[in-house]
Image: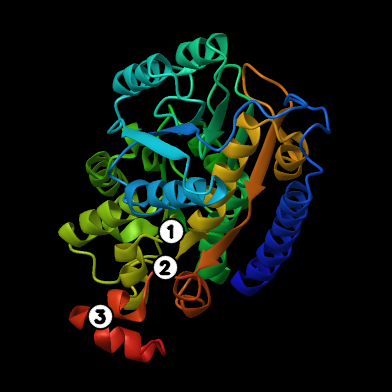
Amino acid sequence: MNARTTRRTAVRRTAMALAASVSAVSLAACGVIDGVGGGSSSSTPKKGNDITVGLLLPETDNPRYEQFDRPIIERQVKSLTHDQGKVVSANAGADAAKQSQQLEQMIADKVDVLLVDAVDAKAIEPGVQKAKDAGIPVIAYDRLAQGPIDAYISFDNELVGQVQGRALVEKLGSKASSSTIVMMNGSPTDPNAAQFKTGALSELQDKVKIPKAGEFDTKDWKPENAKANMDKAIQAIGLGNIAGVYSANDGMAGAVIEALKDAGVTKMPPVTGQDAALDAVQRIISGEQYMSVYKSYPEEANNAAEMAVAKVQGRSIEFDALTRDKVDSPTTKNIPSMLVPVVALTTDNIKDTVIQDGIYTVKQICTDKYKAACAAAGLH
């Protein structure tokens, strides 16, 4: 599936999701939702518009959480509650123990519903149980937390890995079967990382060579850990023998590219990424990074806010319309879920994705350093 086909598929799936959401909202506007429907919500609203949504974010190394997710969720909650609702947020800075403390504080503060983006999916389980015991619904946001969560929203994570792996194989072309690549996977404590890896391997296995010395799980997704791992791979495999790098996200992709430069690479091999971070988009424009995966943060964050408000207000039809997928965690089966589609991002579709969706402007991308590359890519 090429980037354009993936984009079309994403558009179709997004349209279906939005249609379901609009339908549910229309029912709410007509007064149909309140008092109707079963599922996991009560049949009458639990709360009015004066609600507090607790938002727990995992880290600051990836700028998306503070730059996009948090402000989008804040705006959407205010909009859905006629400016009466609010969001209280905390960022754990990749510290699982700190996040557990933040969760317990939000329980003590009696927030009405929790959106939890777990640093460590397993470590957060006792806190999720405490929230449940306190009568506070918990929605796993972006990463699938363990424990009795009420719902889950994220991107189609295996598809992310498939898109990355397929792009790398296609770039290597006829040389793929004889090519050695490095796999820079995400954090072993993040269940999303395992799904990315599974998806990527479904495209990479038996098509490229992945030596044991070239496969890493990267602690806490930290770029400095990815750089250290890449240094080891270069030493073990040899700089000239590395034909490509599967990097699970953009932060690590930047560190991988830095390690390759430090080692004296003359021609950058294709490096994948994920998140469409601004510096990654610029690296793609300049040819340093081959591709990223664009995930529509506005779509994920807006729908998460809708799910949280619908859940706490007991709007079961709206909630069910937003959670038509089902996902299993190690502790809970058939979790009501929404899986948001993704798009392969290359120089060919930057204009049709991150610029069109208002994530970045041409001016933000095309700084003085990248003006020539932008002109070559048709961005002005």
Q: Position of residue 83 (x, y in %)?
A: 47, 48
Q: Position of residue 84 (x, y in %)?
A: 47, 42
* Residue at mark 3: 370
* Residue at mark 1: 272
The quarter holding residue 240 reads bottom left
Tell me if label 1 and label 2 are in contact, CB under 8 Å. yes
| Quarter of the rendering occupied by the N terminus | bottom right
Nearer the N terminus, badge 1 or badge 2?
Answer: 1
Callout 1 amino acid: Thr
Q: Which residue is found at the position 53% from the left and 26% from the top? A: 145
Left or right of 218, for residue 255:
left
Q: Position of residue 71 (x, y in %)?
A: 39, 51
Q: Which residue is found at the position 16% from the left and 58% from the top? A: 262
Nearer the N terminus, badge 1 or badge 3?
Answer: 1
Callout 2 amino acid: Tyr
Bin the neighbour count of mark 2 within 10 Å (Cα to Cα): few under 14, some 14-19, many 20 and up. many
Left or right of 339, for residue 221:
left
- Above or below 330: residue 5: below
* Nearer to the camera, 82 or 367: 82
* Residue at mark 2: 290
